[in-house]
Image: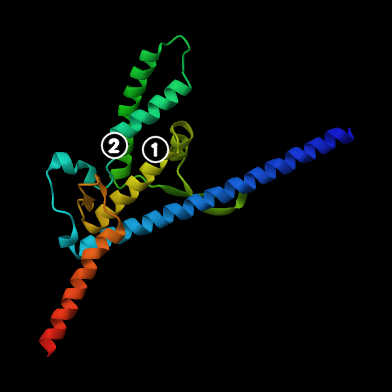
Amino acid sequence: MDAVHKLQRKINDHERKRMHYERKISRLEDDLFERDQEIIRAKFTILQALPELNTPENGPLVDIVRVPGYLDPKMFEAACLKACLNNPCDDREGETMRKDRALLEAETLCNEWRSKTSNGLWELYIEGPEQGEEDDWVQVEVQDLLDLKEKYGEELYRAIKIAWTESTERRRTGVQLKPWDYEAGREKTLTELLVPLGEQIQFLVMKTSKEGK
């Protein structure tokens, strides 16, 4: 019996440590997401105040990726294909059938999450107990997002959180397109956006200085 009790204590200790590290990792992930949110808010606030700093439009077909909150269907396809091939629902299905089913699922999922993140009604957080701390109530992520993370992975989960943040900022500021580097095929960083702002400030300072002489 002593051996059984010792083993049980070890299992309990291991479980406590696991929960401790899971909470720690979760808080670090929250900190990283908060940093990303701050950067997104800063970009949108700058472009709201100085829209001339934004990249000129290049046509709706090209600029669709610049729309705040845009979710790429290919990302859903990749996540659904991976989930379906790794966890087939029916062993009798062939690979081609599983792929076809995954692509249909991806289309449905993409439309669903585009609607959620863009309509202004869906919220990322609700009030709930902190993991492992039932007496401490905090903001926790909604269950449907956590279910998606569990089934389809971190990449899609993070992309949806970013899309929700961008859509929220679009409604707040009225900024319709993200700043873009067409040559690199990516969104401009906050630093890249601030460079022309610094140049503008320097120009105004020099102009004011000359006028004052």
Provide residue 122's location: percent of width, then percent of height: 35, 44
Q: Quadrant of residue 59?
A: top left
Left or right, 144 with reference to 73: right
User: Image point 45% across, 53% down: which residue?
Assistant: 32
User: Image point 48% across, 12% down: which residue?
Assistant: 91
Identified by mark 1, the residue type is Leu
Q: Is residue 139 visible?
A: no
Left or right, 118 with reference to 11: left
User: Image point 36% across, 22% down: which residue?
Assistant: 102
Q: Where 138 sits versus 15, above or below?
A: below
Which label was assigned to residue 72? 2
Q: Is residue 159 visible?
A: yes
Identified by mark 2, the residue type is Asp
Question: Farthest right residue?
Answer: 2
User: Image point 19% across, 51% down: which residue?
Assistant: 176
Which label was assigned to residue 156? 1
Q: Quadrant of the C terminus?
A: bottom left
Q: In which quarter of the image is residue 74?
A: top left
The structure's colour scheme is rainbow
Provide residue 87's location: percent of width, then percent of height: 48, 22
